[in-house]
Image (tube, rainbow, N blue to C red):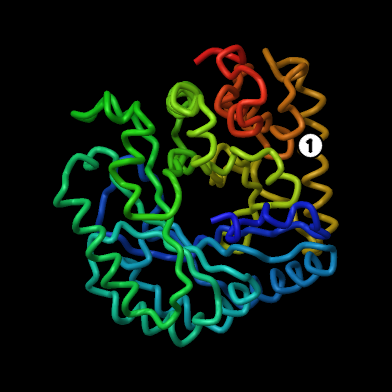
Amino acid sequence: MDAYLASRELSKASHFYLNVNFELLNGCKFNCKGCFVEKNAQKPVEEVHYEKFDALFSDLENSLYKPFIAFIGPTDFLQATNFVDTFSSPHSMGLLRRFKRISLQTTYLDLSLADMVAKTLNENFSDRELEINIVVDPAKIMDDRYLALLEKNKKTFLSKLDNKNVRSFGIMNVYDYDQTKIAEQLRDYDFMHTRVQHLFETTIDYNFSFGRSKDISNEEFLELSGRVKKLFDSSICSDEKAQYLRFSFGKLTDSLIERQYNFRDGKLYYSPLLYERFVSFRDGFEVPLKNYTAEEVENFEMMVQMDQYAKAPAKEECETCPFLASCVDRGILFLMDTFETRKCLVAKRALFAVNTMGALPIAEYGSP
């Protein structure tokens, strides 16, 4: 699996890896718990936007950024009514084909559009790495028929692709798991991983879809992010677990060479990394672009970083924390300010375990 990650090149990296989440797809008949995407609000890439962002990406490449992953969302790509138009559009293709890897997400609950989608991918993107994120419903992980359907539909769809270099990752939306009938099981990361590990190649990633909600309160954000923090801290506390875990916040070194943004309706948005990418379209997340240059993006990044360092002393733990630099790189203090909290958002006990592999007594670092 390491050969598929950007961090494999850290020791010889001479550039940043550029990841962009493109909000392009419309249409989904499912109402997955914890999903806050606007199902029919995305607009196609207009010519004026294509020209500006094509120029921006060219400038970024000249400034030592290497386009790596294009995440395509926000809906289930096997449900999207505009998938073929989007993946056949000269403007969309012009932007997306700059990237080495195309990342899609699906529930694998309905394959009625599978033939059409596979044909489009085969015709236009068979030469790109392809990853498919499986959105798994946490409340259904005890349902053997549900898991069997996901496995069956996954095999069926992949058989339709000419591209055999396809990776499968797993995602669970974050919401109040206490509302489910299996709340105790969902607090056990190992148990969940064991139930669904046959569906994909890594452990479970958590999707903070609630960040897209315009109405989420500071209290709701803290409660939901705190659930994942407690889950990681209480579960990832041994060398063995640290070895098999791969959550995006896990390796401090990743932030040294990866940069991630969100694209929607011709605008670019800053994307903090809280375990997984945090997508929000609040005004404060927008990267101000006038000339669409790498310098403008880098100036915004520098401003965000400097502001976070300046505000670290006002936080409860940040100023003396050994993970401060990584949190600044990932925009964690930016999130803390956005949702008005002084409390740490990070599962530091788990982070320590993953990065030291037991070099120091894990039980003595932080509290579960």
- Depicted 162 relative to depicted 340: above or below: below
In percent of width and height, residue 178 lies at 28, 24
Residue displayed at 72% across by 20% down = 318
In percent of width and height, residue 90 lies at 56, 84
In percent of width and height, residue 29 lies at 25, 59
Q: Residue 111 appears in which quarter of the rendering?
A: bottom left
| Amino acid under disc 1 | Gln
Q: Residue 28 appears in which quarter of the rendering?
A: bottom left
- Depicted 7 relative to depicted 210: above or below: below
In percent of width and height, residue 166 lies at 45, 69
Judge whether residue 222 can be spotted in this image: no
Residue displayed at 50% across by 84% down = 124
Q: Nearer the viewer, residue 108 or 310?
A: 108
Judge whether residue 257 can be spotted in this image: yes
* Number of residues whose C-alpha sits closer than 10 Å to that of mark 1, classed few (under 14), some (14–19) or many (20 or more): some
Q: Is residue 22 left or right of residue 183?
A: right
Residue displayed at 38% across by 73% down = 82
Q: Nearer the viewer, residue 53 or 246?
A: 246
Residue displayed at 57% across by 22% down = 349
Location of mark 1 (residue): 305
Q: Secondary structure at mark 1?
A: helix
Q: Is residue 191 left or right of residue 263?
A: left
